[in-house]
Amino acid sequence: MVETPAGKMAVGMVDGTPFATSNRCRHLLASLGEGKVVDGCLECPWHGARYDVSSGEMVLGPQGAFKPIAGAVKSTLGARKLKTYPVEVRDGAIWLVG
Ligand code: FES
């Protein structure tokens, strides 16, 4: 998680490409910046919902105890995409651009 003038963001790299998204999971508001990249997606640290970091779309609903309602969560709370921000790598650091 990174604090910026535009708010808190989850920032990282997927397959060599940098990304920055809004930080709060659409399920129960976990900090996505504490999550990890799995199979090209940003995975929530609490219940494993996954997001496409290029679009902000929730591509997998929450798992574990919430797995039986994963589809319902994805189609309701998860229907609101994360914000995504344009970023690029300069001198080994990820920068907001644009
Ligand atoms: S808070 Fe992210 S999946 Fe539950």
Image: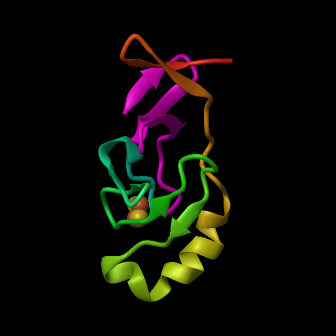
Q: Residue furthest bottom?
A: 68
Q: Residue at x 44, y 60 (%)?
A: 28
The answer to which quarter of the image holds residue 66 is bottom left
Q: Residue at x 61, y 32 (%)?
A: 85
* Ligand 1 sits in quadrant: bottom left
The answer to which quarter of the image holds residue 67 is bottom left
Q: Position of residue 83 (x, y in %)?
A: 63, 42
Depth check: give the residue in front, 51 or 78: 51
Q: Report how many numbered discs are placed on residues in the image.
A: 0
Residue 28 falls inside the magenta stretch: no
Depth check: give the residue in front, 90 or 57: 90
Which residues are drawn in magenta? Answer: 1-27
Q: Is residue 54 above or below residue 90?
A: below
| Position of the C terminus by quadrant | top right
- Asked whether, in this view, residue 8 is left or right of residue 93, the answer is right
- Here the colouring is rainbow
Q: Position of residue 30 (x, y in %)?
A: 39, 52
Q: Position of residue 53 (x, y in %)?
A: 53, 48
Q: Is residue 15 above or below residue 66?
A: above
| Position of the N terminus by quadrant | top left
Q: Position of residue 71 (x, y in %)?
A: 55, 82
Classified by dominant secondary structure, the portion drawn in magenta counts as: strand
Q: Is residue 76 above or below residue 8?
A: below
Residue 15 falls inside the magenta stretch: yes
